[in-house]
Amino acid sequence: MEKTTVNLHSRPKLKSPVLVEGLPGMGYVGKLAAEHLAEELHAQKFAELYSPFFPHHVVIETNGTLRSLRYEFYHAHADSKDIIILVGDVQPVSSEGHYEVAERVLDVAKQFGVKRLFTLGGHATGRYSRGKPKVVGVGDSKLLKEFRARGVTIEKGGGPIIGAAGLLLGLGKLRGIQGVCLLGETHGAVVDHRSAQAVLEMLVDVLGIKIDMSALERRAKKTEQMLERIRREIERRERKERRAEEKEAWYIG
Amino acid sequence: MEKTTVNLHSRPKLKSPVLVEGLPGMGYVGKLAAEHLAEELHAQKFAELYSPFFPHHVVIETNGTLRSLRYEFYHAHADSKDIIILVGDVQPVSSEGHYEVAERVLDVAKQFGVKRLFTLGGHATGRYSRGKPKVVGVGDSKLLKEFRARGVTIEKGGGPIIGAAGLLLGLGKLRGIQGVCLLGETHGAVVDHRSAQAVLEMLVDVLGIKIDMSALERRAKKTEQMLERIRREIERRERKERRAEEKEAWYIG
Amino acid sequence: MEKTTVNLHSRPKLKSPVLVEGLPGMGYVGKLAAEHLAEELHAQKFAELYSPFFPHHVVIETNGTLRSLRYEFYHAHADSKDIIILVGDVQPVSSEGHYEVAERVLDVAKQFGVKRLFTLGGHATGRYSRGKPKVVGVGDSKLLKEFRARGVTIEKGGGPIIGAAGLLLGLGKLRGIQGVCLLGETHGAVVDHRSAQAVLEMLVDVLGIKIDMSALERRAKKTEQMLERIRREIERRERKERRAEEKEAWYIG
Amino acid sequence: MEKTTVNLHSRPKLKSPVLVEGLPGMGYVGKLAAEHLAEELHAQKFAELYSPFFPHHVVIETNGTLRSLRYEFYHAHADSKDIIILVGDVQPVSSEGHYEVAERVLDVAKQFGVKRLFTLGGHATGRYSRGKPKVVGVGDSKLLKEFRARGVTIEKGGGPIIGAAGLLLGLGKLRGIQGVCLLGETHGAVVDHRSAQAVLEMLVDVLGIKIDMSALERRAKKTEQMLERIRREIERRERKERRAEEKEAWYIG
């Protein structure tokens, strides 16, 4: 394998589909959201992508078999809309690899007439915050308006978006495909179902489709509880340290 | 050399051979096992592989000559079975190089009609354990059954397998060649003949061939003794530290 | 995108233009100078360059849209001279990428009949110095004389020039295009409008064109004030430390 | 420049020339030796090699001009022998680049009928030793005998030789060109004319040519004096530390 390769298993007939991407990244937000979407829509796999720009290791499946790292393309039909969902094990290793793989994904998008790209990811804050995670959006102005109306914060001139979620949109734009990148706020160090849920809710609302969120919600609750425990532990320690400092201050005084 | 190159010295006629791979890696387990197999079966070299993806250094031989880094393909005939054995000096430097070199190896496998791949390696535990090292297997379900019957542990959904042993199987599968990866438990920091022996015993048993293990066993004994010395030294130090701590505790008390 | 790509938006007719390059680097000196030049000359964009050798991220614009990283080519006409100005978001990631991208830039230069290259950059000193930053020049001997007459210091046998500013000249020379690299002295850790102004003043003087420097001057003043504050703070701390040391010395004595 | 490129300035007619290589490396031993050889033989430059695998910087010459990094091929005629001398500014950045550039050098060697390769370099010991530096040789057995007769130590099964000096021989052998690598012992952190002289003396003796060593000898004396100073300073400090320790021991005792 000297080049990134797409193996097409079937050629589904799709009418102006949108492509939803969710690959591993910050808090696994994008991957969790896209996988949940594929699951709930009973999406069918129709293609796999392999690349020499992926890391040089393999995945061991739960039945003891192994397989090469890959991206998977699924298609689904919901509320009279065709959707392609892209999920995968990894992101490419090098910058050069990122560009090549993104172009191969866009080749598939073009081949099936994709008109809109929605890339999902996490926006690392390094904080364990309470409440519903904020969802940040960047991309095509027209599309962004629809998201803003639903509560998405428009990111203006912030830092760069690193990796596939940004690159697919940037390179897609050069090839005439508009889209939006939705980033759920997340701590960054924890697999975050809660943030994935927030991102997915925004997406399906704009897409005008309905999916069952209960499975993701259940997992999100667990994330919530874990984050709450971590937060309390941090607060407990800070209080303890503060008291220790006060005591010390008193003695010295 | 801009591309990985295979120099064929001869074209042995082989009947549905299996390919056994053992390259440098954790504890040198795979390399030791495959080299011992080649030696005991009086295997004949029929090809060499060179690659610009290998490190930019050369090997100095014991007679003062030097040569480029390479993989070597040997063939052997044992108990009416044809076997190709792949050994080598190194593994490729980059992920991209790993993929290219693995594909060139699979080209050779395809050319000679290889039906089964057996890749050998070590599974680093970071511990110096006593007794026979466990052998872990992943790969084709049918083949795995035969190994399980002989005591191989089937790895289910564990971490990734990094490097040639996994990649050859992953990419081989995409090209229709099934196989199994056998990993002997090993500390990781010590060249481990003991683990190589454990892996090789499993392999030859399933292959249905017999080889003399005495040379490997002799070296394995030395590994055993070295590991035993390291283990005792570690225990001695731990005891000493524990006593020092107890003494200290007594004084303070 | 497997190769660096130039998208030509128009084909301006230019008469023996010079090319002025200013990409991000030390103190952003080159980029600031070239962008100011383009702005003041009301230069028109006629081409964009995209490359898989750029980092794998995208830029978020102030209106919430995003775009791929790129170089931009502008053309301007001033005092009967044609000028191409090259600015960009980044420099390539790898050495190999640096060479490929530089050759593509030179392709554009050749296509439009460029006879002279002027590359702008910063020369990091690690010091916050007062007064007008020195401008250092290297390149074609004849051209250098004109700069020396205006106060540019000729760098002789110093360290290497790393990145696009040097590489474009080195590779340009091999293709028959002469030029000069102008480096403004700068601390290195601060965005330095002051140094950019010094470099640009030298350049326009030799080019024989006039541009309004007031906007750059205003920003340069701010840099000046910031550097002055940093310098005073450093001096204050040094004095404090010195006094603390003297006191200590006295007690010990 | 996407590929390594050789610019031939002339096509000298050479009779079975040998190629002597000396590129930057440990102690600059190889480069110093090869450059001295070229100088003393009044060798003529006939080719330059440029590569995208070289670092992305340029060299500033002592007259303020700059140029791309390069290898240079010189030819000389001495005592009825034709000699090609390869010197250069750098070695390639990546392993892959090392392989490509070495093959392009061998293309030139083949084109001019080179029968023997002599690669020169340093062998870092990390020690400042007195006396004539040992010269170590590896390579073709027949050629090595001639060197052994003159005092070269044959390295048997030692560590790898990293970089161009080894790689050219390894890849040359695969293309039917035999040769020897001569490595002068050197500290590694100091530019070592003394070691370069030792290596060059061995080489010219075997080549059967005579060159004036006085310039190299003068510089070698300076290296000698510098090394002597460093050695004395190290000894002085060690003595001081030892005395301090003895004193301390006395007090405790």
Image: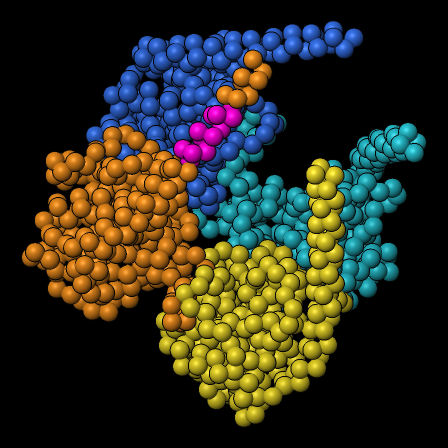
Chain colours: A orange, B yellow, C blue, D cyan
Counting from the top left corner in percent of width and height, residue B11 is at 53, 83
> In percent of the image, x 32 and y 10: which residue is there?
C214
Counting from the top left corner in percent of width and height, residue C20 is at 37, 26
> In percent of the image, x 55 and y 65: which residue is there?
B123
Counting from the top left corner in percent of width and height, residue C184 is at 48, 20
Left or right of residue D121, residue A86 in this image: left
Left or right of residue C100, residue D118 in this image: right
Counting from the top left corner in percent of width and height, residue D180 is at 73, 59
Left or right of residue D144, residue C142 in this image: left
Please name whichever residue, B171 or A248, is drawn nearer the observer in this view of the structure. A248
- In which quarter of the view is residue A185 placed? top left
Left or right of residue C33, residue A242 in this image: right
Q: Residue furthest bottom?
A: B80
Task: Answer whether residue D134 is visible to the viewer in this image.
Answer: yes
State the extent of the magenta-drawn residues as a range.
A234-245
Please name whichever residue, B82 or D21, is drawn nearer the observer in this view of the structure. B82
Please name whichever residue, C138 or B128, is drawn nearer the observer in this view of the structure. B128
> In percent of the image, x 46 and y 57: which residue is there?
B95
Examine the rendered structure and indicate whether residue C36 appears above or below residue B220.
Answer: above
Task: Answer whether residue B25 is visible to the viewer in this image.
Answer: no
Examine the rendered structure and indicate whether residue B160 appears above or below residue A23.
Answer: below
Please name whichever residue, A17 or D203, is drawn nearer the observer in this view of the structure. A17
Location of the C terminus of chain B by quadrant is top right
Q: Magenta stretch mostly in which secondary structure?
A: helix
